Image (cartoon, helix red, strand yellow):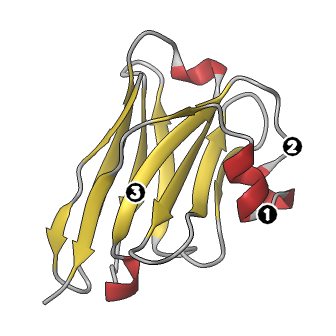
Amino acid sequence: QLQASGGGLVQPGGSLRLSCAASGFTLDRYAIGWFRQAPGKEREFVGGIIWSGEGTFITDSVKGRFTISGDKAKNSVYLQMNSLKPDDTANYYCAATVTPVPPYSVLTSAQAIAGMDYWGKGTLVTVSS
């Protein structure tokens, strides 16, 4: 089971750190992805971590503001979000797959979404003054 947490209301320019925790399996055996879905919009890939290969990857849309990290000891993956904008308002999800995946850098958002096997419940991030 995956569970994303850490969402909330933040002012523009603020920061949040989202956590993705796993129970029942070890995250470092999986490729983990972070995704978001804004109201009325399609789900999009934000970034991910492939422990055994690529490492961390962040999409261009949030590069320079968001970073991904993992803590094997805590069986968790994190999404640090800085300089938040109202357009970042969305439900944020983490997902996992044990199937070998190509580097995230060569996948489209749709391909990254389709490649995930397990999805956690989202955590809502609202950026507003």
Secondary structure beneath dot 3 equals strand
- For this view, does 114 lie left or right of residue 46? right
Residue 61 quadrant: bottom right
- For this view, does 122 lie left or right of residue 10? right
Callout 2: 10 Å neighbours few (<14), some, many (20+)?
some
* Eye-nearest disc, 1 or 2: 1
Q: Label for residue 120?
A: none
Quadrant of the drawing holding the C terminus: bottom left
Labels 3 & 1 near each other (Cβ < 8 A): no
The residue under the point 52% across, 51% down is 34
Task: Give the amino acid type for the residue marked by disc 1 in the picture.
Answer: Thr
Task: Give the amino acid type for the residue marked by disc 2 in the picture.
Answer: Pro
Q: CA distance from mark 3 to mark 2?
A: 22 Å
> Along the polypeptide, which appears first: circle 1 or circle 2?
2
Q: Residue 13 placed where, x, y %?
A: 26, 85
Residue receiving disc 1: 108
Of residues 98 and 62, the one drawn nearer to the viewer in this rendering: 98
Q: Label for residue 92?
A: 3
Q: CA distance from mark 3 to mark 1?
A: 18 Å
Of residues 50 and 24, the one drawn nearer to the viewer in this rendering: 24
The residue positioned farthest toward the front in the image shown: 40
Indicate whether 27 appears above or below 38.
above
Secondary structure beneath dot 2 equals loop
Q: Residue 10 placed where, x, y %?
A: 17, 74
Visible in this render: residue 98?
Answer: yes
Quadrant of the drawing holding the N terminus: top left
Residue receiving disc 2: 102
